Image: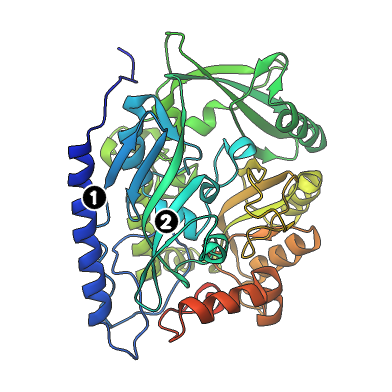
Amino acid sequence: MSLLGKAGHSPAAYESGFAAYRAGVDRLLASYRAIPDDADVRLAKKTSNLFRARAKNTAPGLDVSGLTRVIEVDPDAKTAEVAGMTTYEELVAATLPYGLAPLVVPQLKTITLGGAVTGLGIESTSFRNGLPHESVLEMEVLTGAGEIVTIRPDGADAELFRGFPNSYGTLGYTTRLKIELESVLPYVELRHLRFHDLRELESVLEQVVSERSHDGERVDYLDGVVFGAGESYLTLGRQTDEAGPVSDYTGMDIYYRSIQHDGPAPKRDRLTVHDYLWRWDTDWFWCSRAFGAQNPKIRRFWPKRYRRSSFYWKLVALDHRYNIGDKLAARKGRPPQERVVQDIEVPVERTADFVEWFLREIPIEPIWLCPLRLRDSGSPDSDRPWPLYPLRPGRTYVNIGFWSAVPKSPGQLDGAANRAIEKTVTEFDGHKSLYSDSFYEPEEFAALYGGESYKALKKRYDPGQRLLDLYSKAVQRR
């Protein structure tokens, strides 16, 4: 049976969904008014996909419990309206029966639509579809002033629309989004290409991004994994409706290990489109190995419902709370660890340079690669249209993700490895996402993340400074 059925959408269902959304907004506004004037306004949410530590907040938070549903999927217009706290897992479950998917589906199921826009999301369609905020047609935002503002690419609040991505809730919180969708087929054919030289990988990656094909086959999805300087891979995906056997990486088999092979010919594989979209979530890329979940003796008895990123997050939270990892290391006579959990972007022509530097200086592997190009300039009169994360239109970047820890050396500055990464990324004309630890000085941070544009938006939409500013949230970790 095909994964993708067909269905219609009804005005009655939309009215019901929108009424539930409006009730959720009413609860949100009531919770905003209940927060003392001298307290920071924050979300009252139990889960997060951020790795930044933050100070405990004793004031009540914003009640977003009513903003967790898909309002409507319109298969004719290829759009979806969703509440801001809806997860991509919930959205994909609603769109796939129509043969549709969001233009970019971030890798982890519990990432929310609002989170992917106010932060940044990326995936293997980003070389052709850009970043999640570029497929947004309209948003409603709760500003720091306590107002619900509807923003679009044009109109009175267009500056907030362009300044919202990478603001991390410091300009407001998304309550509703209307986004574009694209048609998808039921299966994805994969080709895993092995490289023994990083510069050859860089060259082929640039070619695939430019031509959207390789060796005569269309490429719809593109990402890669580096296991070492002499072993790296690009994975090329092609949508298909041809029936046939498919792999399953939610059981004993592990997706990232399936990529590896020795021969010169590409290794081929097939997944349902659903399993392709969530291929990284089962083992949180490769991070589940830290919990023993990849050990066959343990994995056999590890409940399948707990093989997902949201459960691993709970284990990480316990480690942060009780400092379990460092305590265990100390018992074995090992030094404490510095967390190095980052995603950065560098221009495609600096990919091999950065990876070579990283493998030489930071003892972490594997590394994830994901190319991207801005889909839409967002503003016809600007060469950097999204001011808080100023990538250049028309230029190919490669996201490089690495998520682990390295030993701390006595006498080093706090965050020595992360500081070195920040310095090198800037030297390579790159950018770093702000979901994890950052160590920039205020002046450098302002130059990299919006500067005067951000100040003007903050003054207009949060005049009472009810929300933390971006530097306080991202670097000072308040």
Say which element carries label 2.
strand
Q: Which residue is mark 1?
A: 18
Q: Toward the viewer: 90 or 71?
A: 71
Quarter of the image for residue 281 reads top left
**Residue 98 x, y percent position in the rendering:** 34, 26
Q: Quadrant of the N terminus?
A: top left
| Above/below status of 264 relative to 221 | above
Quarter of the image for residue 363 reads bottom right
Q: Is residue 476 visible in the rendered structure shown here?
A: no
Q: Is residue 284 visible in the rendered structure shown here?
A: yes
Q: Which residue is mark 2?
A: 139
**Residue 431 x, y percent position in the rendering:** 68, 59
Label 1 crowd (10 A; few <14 / some 14-19 / many >=20): many
| Above/below status of 35 relative to 279 | below
Q: Identify the amino acid type marked 1.
A: Phe
- Count of numbered badges drawn on the protein: 2
Q: Toward the viewer: 433 or 32?
A: 32
Give the CA distance from mark 2 to mark 1.
Answer: 14 Å
Residue 67 falls left or right of residue 473: left
| Above/below status of 255 relative to 40 | above
Label 2 crowd (10 A; few <14 / some 14-19 / many >=20): many
